[in-house]
Amino acid sequence: MTLDLGAVWVRLQAMAQGLLTALPGVVVGLVVFLLFLLLARAVRRGVGSLAGRAGQPPGIALVFSRIASGLFLALGLLVALTIAVPSLNAGTLFSALGVGGVAVGFAFKDIFQNLLAGLLILLTRPFRIGDQIVSGDHEGTVEDIQVRATLLRTYDNRQVVIPNSELYTNRVVVNTAYDKRRLSVPVGIGFGDDIGRARAVILDTLRDVPGVLADPAPEVLIRELGDFSVNLDVRFWIDPPLRRETVHVQDQVLGAVTPALLGAGIDLPFPTWQVLWHDQTETTDGDRTRQREGWPARRDNPPSRQQARAEQEARAPQSADGKRQDPEA
């Protein structure tokens, strides 16, 4: 069997000739794309500078510069492809993009949703870079608002990447939206203490605590009558409303109020419970023939402790002076 390699050689020569023919177009296309890449960087800086001069926040300027740069790169890629592949004209390219756009849209639906949500967040500005927010189980400082997600830095120095669509559609608490913030700490006093005096002692102490604002003035309200104490709600304002200030001022308030109340003779009670057996409360509680307070009825009727004590004293022998002796003596 003889192999005819002539056809293979002719095919290889044709492929090499086609590659050599297309090589100049590929090189020119790469050069054009590199030029567009450099121009895209310049466009990015220019758009960012223009947005900054227009008074836009840094986050919006950054996103607009990224979008302009991406669009310019996409245009450069299309021009480079038409130069590298002469048979690929603009009509064919756009028709191919139109056919594949539906598939790309379904495949990248979440990406486009996050992109649109990021633009809306930057335009509506419910929060800005540097704000401290709470989103779901996460709380921290906004470090960056990107096209797809927002970067949140927690107070224990961890980074949380939250999709923009989640931030835009769900509830977000912005702790630093205003220049002042009201805090409150609970304080419990005894039921026998003078509430007015306790309130005066607390308010007088808050005047000397650093970080507590005099305007709006602090206030002390009765929150509830607890099981073992009268619970007061000590409210005060701080500025700035940052997390560090919140923790430090609360620590100073509690550290100052506690000795002040104790020094004024105000009781700070701790939880106490009194446990009574069923036959220790009333003399009739020993009657088990009828159900009482959830206890099951019984046919036998053991006496209560009071009744048993009275029967023991009745059976105890009398002394010479006529007094009954203690049976346990």
Image (cartoon, rainbow, N blue to C red):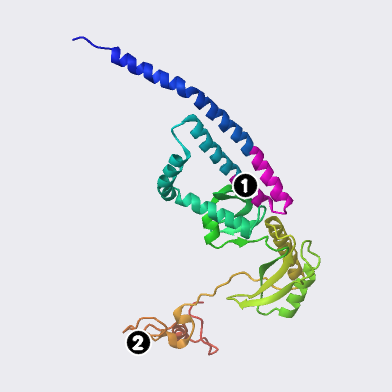
How dense is the environment of label 1, judged by Cα within 10 Å: few (below 14), some, or many (20 and up)? few
What amino acid is at disc 2?
Thr
Which of 317/174 is in front? 174
Residue 65 rendering spot, x and y as whole percentages: 63, 45
The residue most toward the left is 1
Q: Is residue 112 shown above or below 207?
A: above
Query: Mark on residue 198?
Result: none
Q: Which residue matches tag 1?
A: 157
Which label's residue is closer to the chain start, 1 or 2?
1
Which of 182/15 is in front? 15
Residue 180 rendering spot, x and y as whole percentages: 72, 64
Task: Please identify the quarter of the rendering in which residue 246 is found.
Answer: bottom right
Q: Which residues are magenta?
A: 41-67
Residue 293 rendering spot, x and y as whole percentages: 42, 83
What amino acid is at disc 1?
Asn
The residue most toward the top is 2
Q: Is residue 229 shown above or below 71?
A: below
Q: Which mark lies nearer to you, 1 or 2?
A: 1
Mark 1 falls on what kind of element?
Answer: loop
Residue at 59% across, 70% down: 271
The residue most toward the bottom is 322
Residue at 62% across, 69% down: 270
Q: Which residue matches tag 2?
A: 289
